[in-house]
Image (tube, helix red, strand yellow):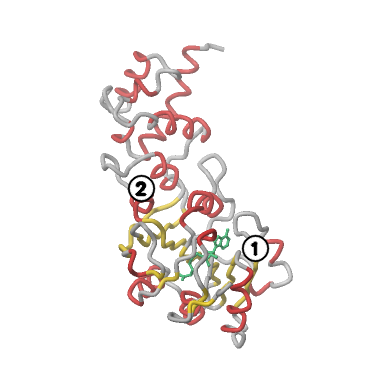
């Protein structure tokens, strides 16, 4: 098989690994500046590919540990960065590999605090979950910042504000765990081969929410159910959990319109609603 794309002097991109080589200098510069790197940073890169972003990261951070699933790219990367002792390559699937364990023999690369990556779009959800954790199970050792190049549609959903068409369960699941910023658009033509969709850069800064959920699992369930039918009022989507009159009262006690839809509630209001649920449950099942 002809593996090399001679015209562009890069390996041919493999669909199964979601490979699209970034070629726009402008997009590269924006990704790197969004990461706010300094010479003391240890960076984790997921999917270094041909190393175009890796080279920039190595220029600005102290160390870069990169995880690449495609075995055939590893010799290319190792050769490119052979002279740099601040680069460590782990070959494997980021979703399943045990990073802490693999980094045991390399103390200088342990515990990277920043993530920068042009990720394969087909596994965006699982990557986000591995990096951030979930509402009920947040990452116990959260990163300082996570800069990702991903599908624009997903970027908009992650960063969505209440009452916008992109605001939904994903916005809440991410924004409960991190501050989310939309950094810039990246058009499909910035890649070779171009993906079918446009892309964007986002920055996540994990932090604890001001008001945490008393019962994070309840919050997850409520958000999922609440958005199950976007156009319906909350009281209809949550019918299986709570009597309409009880929910009306709850919403009013939180200063919300009883006719509210899921998209009307901010993350904080979702948490307040979830926390207030316990009182209603006690009323309906007195101990
Ligand atoms: N960073 C490069 C390549 C981006 S394409 C660039 O900007 O040009 C996505 C990269 O993620 C590819 O190199 C692909 O092989 C790699 N990849 C795909 N699935 C992966 C996984 N599960 N774990 C680690 N790397 C993965």
Residue that numbered label 1 is attached to: 92
Residues under numbered marks 1 and 2 in contact, where contact means CB atoms less than 8 Å apart:
no
Q: Residue at 37%, 39% (x, y): give it.
A: 268
Question: In front: 286, or 2?
Answer: 2
CB at disc 1 and ligand 1 closer than 8 Å: yes
Q: Residue at 34%, 64% (x, y): give it.
A: 188
**Residue 220 picture location, percent across and down:** 48, 35
Residue that numbered label 2 is attached to: 157
For residue 260, what is the image quadrant? top left
Question: In front: 94, or 7?
Answer: 7
* Secondary element type, mark 1: loop
- Asked whether, in this view, residue 12 is left or right of residue 242, the answer is right
Q: Residue at 50%, 30% (x, y): give it.
A: 218
Classify the position of the C terminus by image quarter. Answer: top right
Q: In the rendered view, tell whether residue 214 sits above or below residue 11.
A: above
For residue 91, what is the image quadrant? bottom right
Label 2 crowd (10 A; few <14 / some 14-19 / many >=20): some
Question: In front: 41, or 147?
Answer: 147
Q: In the rendered view, tell whether residue 280 sits above or below residue 70.
A: above
Numbered badge on residue 107: none
Of labels 1 and 2, earlier in sequence is 1
- Asked whether, in this view, residue 191 is left or right of residue 252, the answer is right
**Residue 47 picture location, percent across and down:** 53, 66
Q: In the rendered view, tell whether residue 207 sits above or below residue 79.
A: above
**Residue 93 picture location, percent across and down:** 62, 59
**Residue 162 picture location, percent across and down:** 29, 41
* Secondary element type, mark 2: helix
Classify the position of the N terminus by image quarter. Answer: bottom right
For residue 42, what is the image quadrant? bottom right
- Asked whether, in this view, residue 273 is left or right of residue 102, the answer is left
Camera-near label (1 vs 2) is 1
């Amino acid at each position: 098989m002809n593996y090399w794309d001679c015209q562009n002097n890069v390996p041919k991109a493999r669909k199964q690994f979601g490979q699209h080589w970034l070629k726009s200098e402008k997009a590269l510069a924006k990704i790197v500046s969004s990461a706010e790197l300094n010479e003391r940073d240890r960076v984790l890169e997921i999917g270094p590919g041909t190393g175009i972003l890796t080279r920039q990261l190595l220029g600005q951070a102290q160390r870069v540990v990169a995880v690449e699933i495609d075995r055939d790219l590893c010799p290319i990367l190792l050769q490119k960065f052979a002279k740099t002792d601040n680069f460590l390559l782990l070959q494997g699937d980021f979703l399943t590999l045990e990073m802490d364990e693999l980094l045991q023999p390399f103390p200088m690369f342990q515990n990277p605090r920043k993530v920068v990556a042009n990720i394969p779009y087909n596994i965006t959800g699982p990557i986000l979950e591995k990096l951030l954790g979930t509402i009920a199970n947040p990452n116990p050792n959260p990163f300082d910042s996570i800069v990702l190049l991903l599908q624009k549609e997903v970027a908009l959903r992650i960063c969505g504000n209440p009452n916008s068409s992109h605001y939904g369960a994903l916005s809440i699941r991410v924004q409960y765990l991190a501050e989310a910023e939309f950094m810039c658009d990246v058009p499909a033509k910035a890649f070779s081969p171009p993906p079918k969709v446009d892309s964007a850069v986002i920055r996540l800064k994990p932090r604890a929410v001001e008001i945490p959920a008393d019962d994070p699992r309840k919050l997850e369930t409520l958000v999922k159910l609440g958005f199950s039918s976007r156009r319906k009022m909350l009281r209809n989507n949550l019918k299986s959990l709570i009597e309409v009159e009880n929910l009306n009262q709850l919403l009013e006690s939180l200063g919300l319109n009883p006719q509210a839809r899921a998209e009307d509630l901010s993350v904080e209001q979702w948490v307040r609603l979830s926390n207030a649920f316990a009182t209603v449950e006690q009323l309906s099942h007195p101990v």
